[in-house]
Image (cartoon, helix red, strand yellow):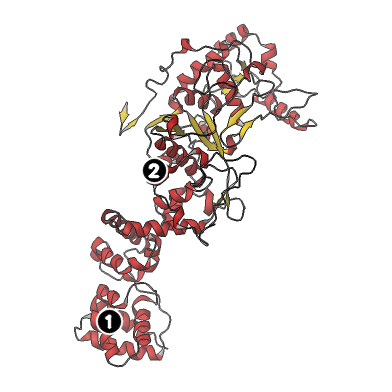
């Protein structure tokens, strides 16, 4: 179904491969040795447990299908925007598709407004998606695969009450060494399948657990190579990770829904944060149990600030849209900035895993703030992006670079009539919020008139590099400036200026006339800037006079004179 150009619902997804067509392994995954054989990319047969396989993706490898799969548990911040961007770039670079999938099956954690924030942020950044899916609307699909895993002996129902599970967790933690897995498989060992079916039929609350292999098969990651990540257990008191696939509310957990969807949606590559690395072996085991082959994974490093501290709220955790709004950051600038957190446009070869030098994100070629060699539009990023350029070191966020990019793209927009108009509109909207009607010293029809803001913008555009700078530097066009007291020599030239303006004088000629009358440049310009603009630099004095007009100019000058001590 196409809705607003976005294909919604799961049409066709669960029918791309009818259930009966799966070649399911009958071997129990408790013995993982047979599931550890690497398998060829793209092959569904064999049930190998090795994710990925090939390290890099070249254009010729065919279209990639990627997805951004956020949980709507918060607003999009810099880290998640980067994940979305890399997946987007990979899809566009290869002529593939980019999907948006809302992973919202943990209903308790869903935050109001988060879904809309995700869509709005992606649209704002220009990361338009080809298809959209919402996991909470697909419960039936996951249930079918949960049944398959149950029927094939890869999963079992667990009826243990919460108190028992809590106690098991606590005791696992107390073991020496502690066990990260806590469940003792009581229900697997003591509840027969027939009894399990009976109890489930009476509505007894339960979860469905996956039989985790005793040892997870190694898997391959584009950035990290082949990894064998195991869960720590205590040899004297062996517990099992046995991840829950279906919760007692019947909804799938992240693990099941993520695997089923990536497979059914034909996802070929998953770029996601390193925090998901520990899930990868579990996912690989679930893929193997279902007889599927996993996508290629690239787990990208965490973001840190330029001096290697955890990112502060302002730098990293803050919502992208809030950051952009409060600081006047343009989407092109933020996209450029975020692209370079962990991706280097200059890398031509697959990163050498032993010697990879992390791309620091701080300027190397251009001193403070980065160089124009690092400026890329979205089209340029699409053309250049490759997984080969991903770097393994923690990506450092250096905000000077963001400001540099913002200036660059701001100036670029000025050269394009439509983009320039958009900037003016944004400046106008921001100014309306910054200066309310009761603070303004100009008639309401003028304050809200975009052509007035256009005049102001024209006078300031060479002196500002962002929408926020406009708001900072142009407020005196809308309200009386804050004035420090006026000095005696200033009063003299201002008094002369006020007299001239009284004579219906063209305000544009005021400076020249005063200069001709023997006042120095410093006297004329700094006195008038003080009186008219509260000393705020930027616009030229004749432009300020022309925009304010003779009457407003004169009354500001009179006000300054009256403030002489
Ligand atoms: N829902 C997970 C998240 O919020 C997705 C992780 C993944 O990409 O597999 O990031």
Q: Residue at x 72, y 26 (%)?
A: 168
Provide residue 316's location: percent of width, then percent of height: 53, 50
Nearest-to-viewer mark from 2 and 1: 2
| 15 versus 171 height, above or below | above
Q: Quadrant of the N terminus?
A: top left
Q: Quadrant of residue 192?
A: top right
| Residue bearing the label numbered 1 | 554
The alpha-carbon separation of the residues under discs 2 and 1 comes to 46 Å
Relative to 272, residue 345 above or below? below
Q: Residue at x 53, y 13 (%)?
A: 148
Q: Quadrant of the C terminus?
A: bottom left
Q: Which mark is residue 204?
A: none
Name the spot of residue 197 as percent of width and height, x first: 58, 9
Please report contact status of discs 2 and 1: CB closer than 8 Å, yes or no: no
Describe residue 153's horizontal placement relative to residue 144 as left or right.
right
Instruction: Identify the residue shown where x is 60% and y is 15%.
Output: 154
- Expressed as whole percent of the image width and height from the top left, the position of residue 216 reads 66, 24
Q: Secondary structure at mark 1?
A: helix
Binning the other alpha carbons within 10 Å of mark 1 as few (below 14), some (14 to 19) or many (20 upward) gives many
Q: Mark 2 sits on what residue? A: 120
Q: Is residue 515 visible?
A: yes
- Mark 2 residue CB less than 8 A from any atom of ligand 1: no
Which mark sits nearer the N-terminus, 2 or 1? 2
Asked if 498 appears above or below 546 in the picture, the reply is: below
Q: Residue at x 72, y 23 (%)?
A: 239
Q: Residue 19: where, in percent of width, then height?
A: 46, 13
Residue most extreme to the left = 504
- The count of marks equals 2
- Residue 523 appears left or right of 513: right
């Amino acid at each position: 179904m196409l809705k607003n150009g976005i294909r919604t619902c799961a049409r066709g997804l669960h029918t791309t491969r009818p259930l009966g067509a799966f070649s399911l392994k009958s071997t129990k995954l408790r013995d993982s040795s047979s599931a550890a054989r690497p398998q060829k990319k793209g092959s569904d047969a064999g049930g190998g447990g090795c994710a990925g396989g090939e390290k890099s993706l070249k254009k010729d490898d065919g279209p990639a299908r990627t997805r951004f799969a956020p949980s709507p548990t918060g607003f999009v911040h810099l880290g998640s925007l980067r994940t979305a961007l890399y997946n987007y770039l990979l899809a566009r670079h290869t002529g593939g598709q980019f999907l948006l999938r809302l992973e919202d099956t943990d209903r308790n954690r869903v935050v109001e407004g988060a879904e809309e924030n995700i869509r709005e942020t992606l649209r704002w950044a220009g990361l338009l998606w080809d298809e959209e899916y919402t996991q909470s609307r697909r419960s039936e699909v996951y249930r079918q695969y949960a049944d398959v895993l149950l029927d094939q002996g890869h999963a079992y129902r667990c009826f243990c009450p919460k108190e028992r599970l809590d106690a098991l967790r606590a005791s696992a933690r107390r073991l020496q060494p502690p066990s990260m897995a806590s469940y003792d498989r009581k229900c697997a060992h003591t509840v027969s399948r027939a009894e399990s079916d009976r109890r489930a039929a009476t509505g007894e609350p339960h979860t469905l657990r996956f039989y985790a292999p005793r040892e997870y098969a190694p898997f391959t990651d584009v950035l990290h190579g082949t990894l064998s990540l195991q869960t720590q257990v205590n040899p004297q008191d062996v517990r099992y990770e046995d991840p829950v696939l279906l919760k007692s509310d019947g909804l799938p957990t992240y693990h099941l829904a993520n695997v089923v969807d990536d497979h059914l949606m034909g996802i070929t590559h998953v770029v996601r944060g390193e925090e998901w690395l520990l899930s990868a072996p579990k996912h690989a085991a679930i893929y193997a149990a279902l007889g599927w082959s996993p996508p290629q994974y690239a787990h990208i490093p965490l973001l840190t600030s330029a001096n290697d501290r955890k990112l502060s709220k302002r730098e990293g955790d803050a919502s992208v849209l809030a950051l952009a709004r409060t600081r006047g950051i343009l989407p092109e600038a933020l996209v450029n900035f975020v692209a370079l957190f962990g991706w280097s446009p200059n890398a031509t070869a697959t990163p050498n895993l032993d010697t990879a030098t992390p791309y620091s994100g701080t300027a190397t070629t251009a001193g403070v703030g980065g160089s124009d060699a690092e400026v890329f539009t979205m089209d340029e990023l699409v053309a250049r992006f490759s997984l080969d350029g991903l770097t393994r070191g923690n990506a450092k966020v250096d905000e000077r670079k963001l400001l540099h990019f913002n200036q660059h793209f701001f100036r670029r927009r000025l050269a394009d009539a439509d983009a320039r108009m958009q900037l003016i509109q944004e400046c106008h909207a921001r100014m309306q919020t910054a200066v309310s009607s009761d603070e303004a010293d100009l008639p309401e029809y003028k304050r809200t008139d975009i052509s007035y803001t256009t005049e102001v913008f024209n006078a300031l555009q060479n002196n500002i590099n962002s929408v926020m700078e406009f708001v900072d530097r142009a407020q005196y066009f809308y309200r009386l400036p804050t004035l420090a007291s006026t000095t005696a020599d200033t009063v003299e030239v201002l008094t002369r200026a006020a007299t001239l303006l009284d004579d219906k004088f063209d305000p544009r000629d005021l400076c020249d006339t005063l200069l001709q009358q023997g006042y120095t440049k410093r006297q004329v310009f700094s006195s008038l800037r003080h009186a008219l603009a509260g000393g705020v630099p930027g616009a030229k004095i004749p432009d300020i006079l022309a925009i304010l007009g003779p009457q407003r100019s004169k009354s500001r000058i009179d006000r300054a004179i009256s403030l002489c001590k």
